Image (cartoon, rainbow, N blue to C red):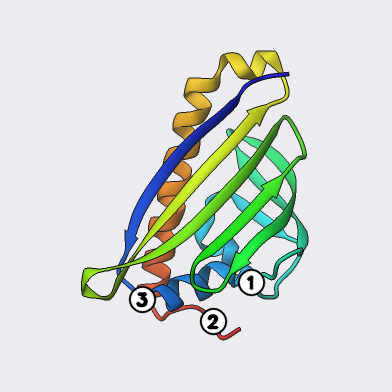
Amino acid sequence: MSANYLTTIKVTLPADRATVFTAMCDTSRYPLWNSGMKHISVTKPLEKGMQYQTETILAGHVIQAYVEITRLIPNEAIEFTSESGALSYKALFTFQDIDGGHTQVSCTLQFQFRSFVIDLARPVIESMAQTRVRGNLESLAVLIAQGGPAPV
């Protein structure tokens, strides 16, 4: 079995913690800020234990993922896990107030490759994952600034 890899990405969003948390729980707007996401099987607010399917374009390929919300603490943390496909992962997002009414979102991403061939490309995939998560959170910040999350 391949090794686990761990990386943390931190992004500051210009909104209060409750607004950022609510926006991240609004699955109906995920395709607006999750790069490459083409489909999500639910359009209701996240809740602990929720399971859903996504289809995302990554490097020109459609990737299907089956995701479960394994932790959800209002305004504090959201944890997603996926055990499907060539890559299994756990993403823990935490939210912290910072000066000026802004929120620091930290994403600790733990992932494991199920294929030795994919494992060889680990540095490239790690870099892509970091860039994608950072870009997605920056897109979420723009979406919030343009009018905030939809009511949940």
Q: Are marks 2 and 1 in contact (CB under 8 Å)?
A: yes
The x, y position of residue 109, in whole percent, is 53, 42
Residue at mark 3: 16
Give the crowd class for mark 2: few <14, some 14-19, many >=20 residues within 10 Å: few
Residue found 77% across the figure and 39% down from its top: 84
Which element type, helix, strand or loop, lies under badge 2? loop
Alpha-carbon span between mark 2 and mark 3: 15 Å
- Pick the front one: 110 or 39: 110
Q: Is residue 81 left or right of residue 138?
A: right
Q: Residue furthest left?
A: 100
- Pick the front one: 88 or 26: 88
Alpha-carbon span between mark 3 and mark 1: 21 Å
Residue at mark 2: 150
Residue found 73% across the figure and 52% down from its top: 67
Q: Is residue 18 above or below residue 52?
A: below
Closer to the chain start, of discs 2 and 1, is 1
Which element type, helix, strand or loop, lies under badge 1? helix
